[in-house]
Image (cartoon, helix red, strand yellow):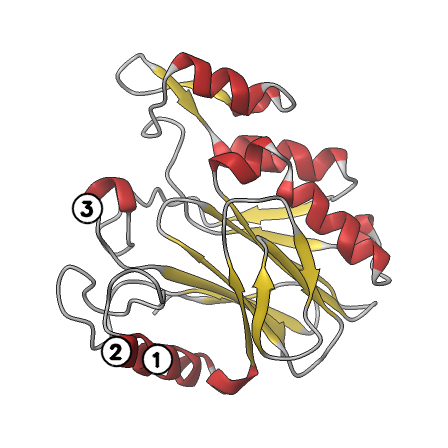
Amino acid sequence: MGNVIELGRGARAAVTERTGGVSAPPYDSLNLGLGTGDEREAVLANREAAARDLGFSAARVAWMNQVHSADVLVAEGPGGVGTCDGVVTTRSDVVLAALSADCLPVLAADTGAGVLGAAHSGRLGTAHGVAARLVEAMVAQGARADQLSVFLGPAICGRCYEVPPEVQAETARETPEAECITRWGTTGVDMRAAVTAQLRRAGVVDITADGRCTLESEELFSHRRGAPTGRLASFVWRS
């Protein structure tokens, strides 16, 4: 289980790791993603265990049906939110979650306004600015961009995320910071740099990052390192 961090006064964030669950290989063992091919009962048991270890009930969690979009929805309660890649809530009893296995989780809180947000920023979500859309949706619920505390979870790093030149160009069209060179000297995408730039332009000041590369870190799931594989969950909730 990953470390819990304070995300502004009165909110917490955490990212799970691979160990501590009941899933069999290749999803071993704390796979929190339904739809990966893993046994549903194992994933639900893992969700219960992860929530218990973090100090909240699994029944409080709002889950997205993630599709690599820039759509953001409002969670009025726990359970399935709908098809989107960003979710916000003003409910103090709701825990927001984003699943990933190389994509970048974005967790945000304005505790003064009582607004939480979570997003899944994959390559397409990064290209289409889902992180900025998340900020807009939180502001619409009463938050202030300059009062947000944002935590970026682990993701594949730019030095490992090799893509064809045309894919790099598409991703960097609106956010040039996405463009990078991999450790092999080829074209790559740096999602963390791109999303950080998007958040800064949206008015966010307080941004921290996990910094780990999912491809390089064996304790994390990575789709590029070994598909099929499980999914990490990044959570944000009121403490």
Residue at left offset 65%, top offset 23%: 174
Residue closest to the eye, 114 or 86: 86
Q: Is residue 214 left or right of residue 69?
A: left
Q: Spatial distance from mark 1 to mark 3, Cα to Cα? A: 22 Å
Q: Spatial distance from mark 2 to mark 1, Cα to Cα? A: 5 Å
Is disc 3 placed on a helix, strand or loop?
A: helix
- Number of dots carrying numbers: 3
Please provide percent x and percent y for residue 90: 76, 72
Among numbered discs 2 and 3, the one appearing first in the sequence: 2
Is disc 2 placed on a helix, strand or loop?
A: helix
Q: What amino acid type is highlighted by mark number 2?
A: Ala
The quadrant of the picture occupied by the N terminus is bottom left
**Residue 107, visible in the rendered structure:** no
Q: What amino acid type is highlighted by mark number 3?
A: Gly
Is disc 1 placed on a helix, strand or loop?
A: helix
Q: To which residue does mark 2 refer?
A: 42
Please give the label number shown on residue 44. Answer: 1
Q: Is residue 178 left or right of residue 91?
A: left
Please provide percent x and percent y for residue 139: 83, 54
* Residues at circles 2 and 1 in contact by the CB criterion of under 8 Å: yes
Q: Spatial distance from mark 2 to mark 3, Cα to Cα? A: 20 Å
